[in-house]
Image: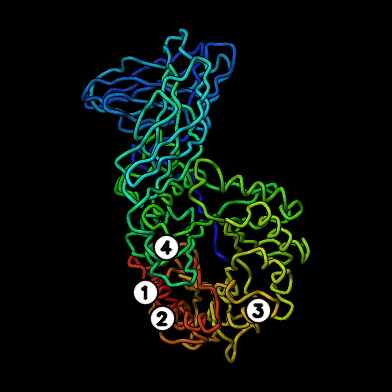
Amino acid sequence: MRFRHRAAAGFATLLLPFAGLVGLASPAQAATSATATYAKTQDWGSGFEGKWTVKNTGTTSLSSWTVEWDFPSGTSVTSAWDADVTSSGTHWTAKNKSWNGTLAPGASVSFGFNGAGSGSPANCKLNGGSCDGGSTPGDAAPSAPGTPTASDVTNTSVKLAWSAATDDKGVKNYDVLRDGAKVATVTTTSYTDTGLTAGTSYSYTVQARDTADQTGPASGAVAVKTTGGTTDPPPTTGDKVKLGYFTEWGVYGRNYHVKNLVTSGSASKITHINYAFGNVKNGQCTVDDTYAAYDKAYTADQSVSGTADTWDQPLRGNFNQLRELKAKYPNIKVLYSFGGWTYSGGFAQAAANAAAFAKSCKAVVEDPRWADVFDGIDIDWEYPNACGLTCDTSGAAAFKNLMSALRTEFGSNYLITAAITADGSNGGKIDAADYGGASQYVDWYNVMTYDYFGAFNAQGPTAPHSPLTSYAGIPQAGFNSADAIAKLKSKGVASKKLLLGIGFYGRGWTGVTQAAPGGTATGAAPGTYEAGIEDYKVLKNSCPATGTVAGTAYAYCGTNWWSYDTPATIAGKMTWAKNQGLGGAFFWEFSGDTSNGELVTAINNGLS
């Protein structure tokens, strides 16, 4: 997918409401010798500026810090910097950032805030102990308890049990979390949760708290479905796969979140989501933007469940929102997609030790914090033994070996898929790798039947970026969906393992003087996020379609020429896909659609 560039996210926390400025750092260790001192640095009557300074007065390094204090009623923090600050009533808590938690002996660090009111802090605690450098109740946070086991599941209740956490000074109690929200605090290693809804899926984790009130890391998650109720509602989507990509970075500039799948009506019309993208570094799978993935806090109105994230819940961000989405739509399966145009350079090293790569991917997908979120893995290698952003020379067998290793590692219960080239030309990218041999290990291929033509060839000729078939004057033979699908079938890939790709965007040129395809241009047409590319939701109004070619719409307005799919052309493509016996369709990506999901609706209607 040619334009999948990751948006820079470093500034994102500056855009969040104050209540969201909380991290997912590990619980602080209690320092046996450290101080926290407060100073009011400015006062302008109705408000003030305060500063806390944490100093390590001991002889060993401090790995993290948490400062707590109480303000009198009417005094509050309104903004903060260099710490993650949150409150519960009049009690305030500040935790170190990821980059300023470690303090060598004698070192200090400060964080500041703006406040409203006139009060001063009281009842200061540093890592659960005294702020004046005295002894503290404990030296370390407790360990994670064992992953809970579920028993005695009924329509409205479930019994949970777990192995005990450990702590140098003793464990005081355990917080039981249902779908990330605390539902109980108990002193034993079991709990029966009641008042549940019949036939509903829940996810449970447990956290331990020691005698210094330090909370340890969450346990692994156990998924539970209560008995009774109605069975899972059958998808309204028929028996075809209807898959959309959700981009990790879309939560920033595009302001597109998991909840938009619900409000647009799209969630009820899809079967699968590919979460894009995980990175491939040093031959291993890794989470890319950890803040967007599992740390970003959602308010009640932003979240799928309607419940606000809390600073101390074990999972937030997109992953938790996907968990909440699956609770509402149990038929949806979510796959973690790794690679993409920007991150495919790491696959060559991965292919050199495919078994180790597969093991690393499973560790990410099955991380205990979100093991219940993902149902499989998608590999988006652009392109095996061919050129994309970089050129790969791993050999024709590398892709097959990689997919074989993934199937061996993940087993038969996980979905394993791949987004692959749609270059149907003779000697092209499909011919460069053993897609036929690898197909035995995958559930399906997402054939990227788009981005054939675009303003990356700045002078044109103008041509539809996602032609379904060839046509007179097509700039490159084999660059169309029909030829790509035919070539993959000829290599032994079953029709039902092929999904047709749809772009929820257009590609365009400027400086064009003719409406029909084949015109010359002077460069890329202006786009909201990138020149030469624009979302369907914009183009349908700014440059409405004026014709069709090869099953795809095109539009000529002013001196700009665009091609993109509309509900009408998607209907034609879905009919073609069904006639070919394909397994369904997929699209890149949700945020390009209208707020009421016009294109998703067209795919659903066309395949149902």
Q: Amino acid at mark 4?
A: Ser
Between residue 356 and residue 165, name the one nearer to us. 165
Marks 4 and 1, Cα distance to the nearest angstrom? Answer: 17 Å
Location of the C terminus (image quadrant) = bottom left
Of helix, strand and loop, which one carries label 3? helix
Q: Name above or below for residue 544 compared with residue 42.
A: below
Residue carrying label 3 = 489
At which x and y percent is residue 553?
Answer: 45, 82
Residue carrying label 2 = 557
Which is closer to the viewer, label 4 or label 2? 4
Marks 3 and 4, Cα distance to the nearest angstrom? Answer: 31 Å
Which is closer to the viewer, label 3 or label 4? 3
Of helix, strand and loop, which one carries label 4? helix
Compared across the picture, whether 233 is left or right of 60 comes to left
Marks 4 and 2, Cα distance to the nearest angstrom? Answer: 24 Å
Classify mark 2: residues with Cα within 10 Å, few (<14), some (14-19) or many (20+): some
Between residue 231 and residue 468, name the one nearer to us. 231
Classify mark 1: residues with Cα within 10 Å, few (<14), some (14-19) or many (20+): few
The residue at 46%/83% (across/down) is 572
Q: Is residue 462 visible?
A: no
Identify the mark nearer the N-term, 4 or 1: 1
Q: Which disc is residue 591 wearing? A: 4
Identify the mark nearer the N-term, 3 or 4: 3
